[in-house]
Image (spheres, rainbow, N blue to C red):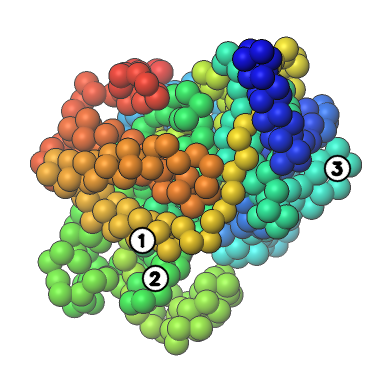
Amino acid sequence: MCCSLKRNINFARSITKIILMQVAEFDVVVIGSGLAGLSAAYHSSKFGNVAVVTKSQLDTSNSFYAQGGIAAAISDEDSPELHKHDTRVAGRRLCDTDAVDVLVNEGKQRVLELIEMGMEFDKKDGEIVMGLEGGHGKRRVLHADGDATGRAITSFMLKKVQEQPTVKFFENVAAIKLLQNNDCVWGLHAYDFTSNKNIVFKTKSVILASGGVSRLFLRSTNPNTATGDGIAIAYEAGARVADLEFIQFHPSALYMPGKDAFLISEAVRGEGAWLVNEKGERFMKDIHPLAELAPRDVVAYSIFRQIQKSENKNVYLSLRHLDREKVIHRFKNIDLKLKEVGLNIADDLLPIAPAAHYMVGGVRTNLNAETNISGLFVCGEVASTGVMGANRLASNSLLECLVFGKRASENAAKRKKQTCIYEMPDPIRIDKENEALFLQYKNEIATLMSENLGIVRNKKMIEAALIRFSEIANKFADYKNEYNLLKIKNAAIICKLIAQSALIREESRGGHIREDFQKEIPDFKVHIIQQKGKNVTFEKIKK
C-alpha cells in the first residue's frame, strides 16, 4: 500500500510538472542570437527544424554592437599564413595552431561566401576598403557602414535566418539548464519572460552561442545580457571550461563619470588617432614599435599605468591632426554618439579609459565545436576553441563566429537522435521580492571583479575575491527554482572560476597581468582546464 501510494505521488508530481511546462521539439536548439548563433542557425536550417532562444531581443548581442570590422586575408597582398602569424603573436604563444589554421583559411572562405550572399562591405572606387587595426601587419579588416560592422553583418544574417521556414525564434526566453541523462543531452529548460511560462525544448543537439561575461564588471562595453549564463549552464552540466583568467579590456572606451562605457572602435586608432596623456603627450611611441596599433593588452595596460601616474581617471584620444571631413564620414555613428554627450570626434580630446570587453576563454571545444558532453556544441565568444590564446587579435571575433558557427551546425546535424530518459525538471519562477537582493549581490560582485580582477592583479587581491565569491556561491548553492537567486549563484560561480584560474597562472601573459609575477613563464604554454567536481588540469597547446 505504501509503495502504491508512493508511486501515485510520484506520478502526480510528474503530471504537475508537465502541466507547468510548455514542451517543444526541434532537431537543433541554438542559444543566442549574435553572429555565432545566427550563423549556426542558418546552416542548421538546412538539416532540420531549429529553435533560436535568446533572453532579450534578437538584435541584442556583442556582435550587434561591434564597431570594429571582420578580419580576413582576402586581398592579393595578404595571405592566411600572415593572418595566422598576427593571430599567434597577439595570442602570446597560447593559441592552438590547428584552430588558428581553421580560422584563417576557412575564415577567408566564409567572408567570400558572405559577399556572394549579398553582404555589402564598404568600398572605394568599386573595391572593398581594407582597414588596419591593432596587431595586424596588413590591411585585412573589412568594415560595413563605417563603424557599424557588427550591426550590419548581424542584421544581414538575421534577415537570412528569418527567411528560413525551418527556424523559429524565441525572444525574451532565458536558458536555465541543459537537460541530460547519463551524459546524454536531450534538451533545454528555459523560462519565457513574456508569458511567465517554463519551456522544455526536446532536441538531439544544443548549440551554445550565448556570448561573454564582461557585464560582470562595473565598467563594460557589453550589453546588459553579457553575464556569462552560457558558461554557468555548461559548467553545471559537466562541460570543461578553459582560459577563464584571460579577460580582454578594450583600451578606448569613452570615460564619462556616471555614464556607461561607450566603445570607440579600434579602427579609430587604425586610421591614425593618437593616445595622449593629460599633458597632451603621446606615450605609446616609447612603449611599443606599433605605438597606438600595438595589441590590445599592451595598449590597455599602458593606459592603466598612465592613469595611475596622474590624478585623472582617463587619458585622451586625439584625431585633431587627421583630415576632419574624412574622420567624420568614416566614423559617423561614433560621432553621433559623442555629440549626445557634447563632444566632437574631430575637434575634441576624447576622454577614454579601458573597460571589460571580451572573454578570451570559455567552454572548451575541439575543432568541430564539440564539447566533452555528447550533444553540446559551442561557438562564438562563449567558446574556447584555442584560437584566441591569451589575447584576441582585433576583429577576429566576428570571423570566429562565422567559421565555428558553421562547423557547429554541420556536426550537430550528424548526431543521431539518442534514446534518453526524459525527466521533466522542476519549474522555475520569478519572485519580484528577490530583485533587490539580486541587485545588491550583482553590484558587490561587479565591484570585486573590477577592483580585484581588473587589468592588473595580485595574489592578495585575487584570494580576497575568491573567498567572497565562494561564500556567495555556497550561500545560494541550493537555490535552483527562483530566477533571481539562480542568477546570483551563477554569477558567483563564474567569478569564482575566473579567480581560481587567475590565481593559478603565476605569470603575466596577454589579458592576464599579475603585478607579483610580471614576466611570462616560457614553458607554461598550457590551457587551465576547470570542470565541476574535478581537480584543475593543464592542457598543452596544440602546435
Residues tagged 2 and 3 counted as in contact (Cβ below 8 A): no
Can I make out residue 30 in this image? yes
Dot 3 amino acid type: Gln
In the image, residue 380 above or below residue 316: above
Is disc 1 placed on a helix, strand or loop? helix
In the displayed structure, does residue 284 sit left or right of residue 490? Answer: left
Residues tagged 1 and 2 counted as in contact (Cβ below 8 A): no
| Nearest the eye: 151 or 383 | 383
How far apart in space, not on screen, are marks 2 and 3 (Cα)?
Answer: 39 Å
In the image, residue 360 above or below residue 435: above
Could you tell me which quadrant the N terminus lies in?
top right
- Of circles 1 and 2, the one toward us is 1
In this figure, which residue is indicated by the disc labeled 2? Answer: 254
Could you tell me which quadrant the C terminus lies in?
top left
| Residue 475: quadrant of the picture | top left
Residue 164's label in the rendered image is: 3
Dot 2 amino acid type: Leu
| Nearest the eye: 503 or 522 | 503
